[in-house]
Amino acid sequence: GQQVMQIPQYQHVQEGEDFTTYCNSSTTLSNIQWYKQRPGGHPVFLIQLVKSGEVKKQKRLTFQFGEAKKNSSLHITATQTTDVGTYFCAGNLRRTSYDKVIFGPGTSLSVIP
Amino acid sequence: DGGITQSPKYLFRKEGQNVTLSCEQNLNHDAMYWYRQDPGQGLRLIYYSQIVNDFQKGDIAEGYSVSREKKESFPLTVTSAQKNPTAFYLCASSLLPGLGTDTQYFGPGTRLTVL
C-alpha cells in the first residue's frame, strides 16, 4: 500500500540553527500537507502544496513540493524555541473518492536555547 | 465559534470495559476521522466517514467501532476486544476529498488510560 516516510525521526538543534525535514512517498501524490503538533497538543494544519515544484513560504518556514510530486521538504531558518514540536507531512493519492490522506510518522524537533 | 470538540480530555477505565469517546464538529464538514497516537509515534487511522450512515475501516480498526448518525457527530467506542487501548485519540474533520483541499482540522484529543 501507499507509504509516506519522513526523515529524520528526531532532530536536536541549537537555537538559531536551521532545520529541514524530508517527506517521501512511494507513489505520486495529488497534494501534500504539513502539520505541526506541539508537545501535549494536537496537529495543526500549516500548509498545502498542490503543484509540481511548488514553493511556499510562511515567515521562517519554506515548503517545497518535488517535481515528481513524490517528495516534499520543510525548512525552518534560524529556529526558535517556539518551533519545538513534531512536524507531520500528509499526502493523498486521490485515485478514488474513498482515498484518504496518509500521514507520515513525523519528525520531532527539539530546540536547545 | 466554529471548531471540533472532543470530550473528555482525560478518561480512565478498567480493563474489560467498553468506553465511548465523543467527537463533535460545527464546521459543516462531511468527512470525519479517528486516529490513535501512541507516545512518540505518528497518527494511525482507525475509522473514517465521508457521509452520514457510512464509514470505512482504517489501518487499525480491530477492537473499535463507530457510528455516524449525524453529520456533526462521530463517536468512537473502544471495546474490550482492543488489546492495548491506552493511547491518545484524535478526531478530525475535513471537506470531502476532491473539493480542493484535504486540510484536516483536529480536535484537542482524549487521553485514554485503561487500568
Image (cartoon, coloured by chain):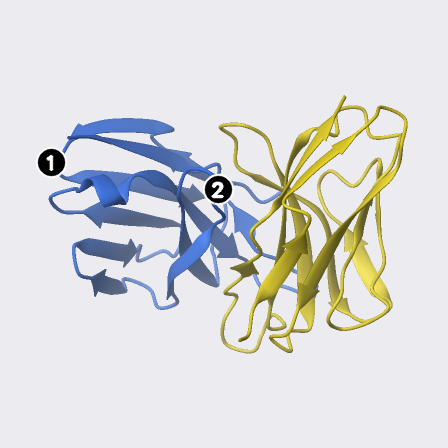
Q: Nearer the viewer, residue B9 or A3?
A: B9
Q: Badge 2: how crowded within 10 Å, few (<14), some, or many (20+)?
A: many
Q: Nearer the viewer, residue B38 or A31?
A: B38
Q: Position of residue A101 (x, y in %)?
A: 57, 55
Residue placed at 32% from the left, 41% from the top? A22
Left or right of B4? Residue A7 is left
Dot label at residue B19: none
Q: Mark 2 belongs to which subunit?
A: A
Q: Relative to A63, is A109 above or below?
A: above
Amino acid under disc 2: Gly
Left or right of B31? Residue A16 is left
Q: Badge 1: how crowded within 10 Å, few (<14), some, or many (20+)?
A: some
Which chain's colour is blue?
Answer: A
Q: Quadrant of residue B75?
A: bottom right
Residue placed at 50% from the left, 76% from the top? B100
Q: Quadrant of the N terminus of chain A?
A: top right
Q: Mark 1 belongs to which subunit?
A: A
Image colour assigned to chain B: yellow
Left or right of B9? Residue A54 is left
Left or right of B80? Residue B57 is left
Q: Quadrant of residue B24?
A: bottom right
Dot label at residue A17: 1
Q: Relative to A53, is A18 above or below?
A: above
What whole-number distance in Å separates the C-alpha atoms at marks 2 and 1? 24 Å
Q: Position of residue A113 (x, y in %)?
A: 15, 30
Q: Position of residue A25 (x, y in %)?
A: 46, 45
Residue placed at 22% from the left, 47% from the top? A75
Label 2, secondary structure: give it: loop
Amino acid under disc 1: Glu
Dot label at residue A104: 2
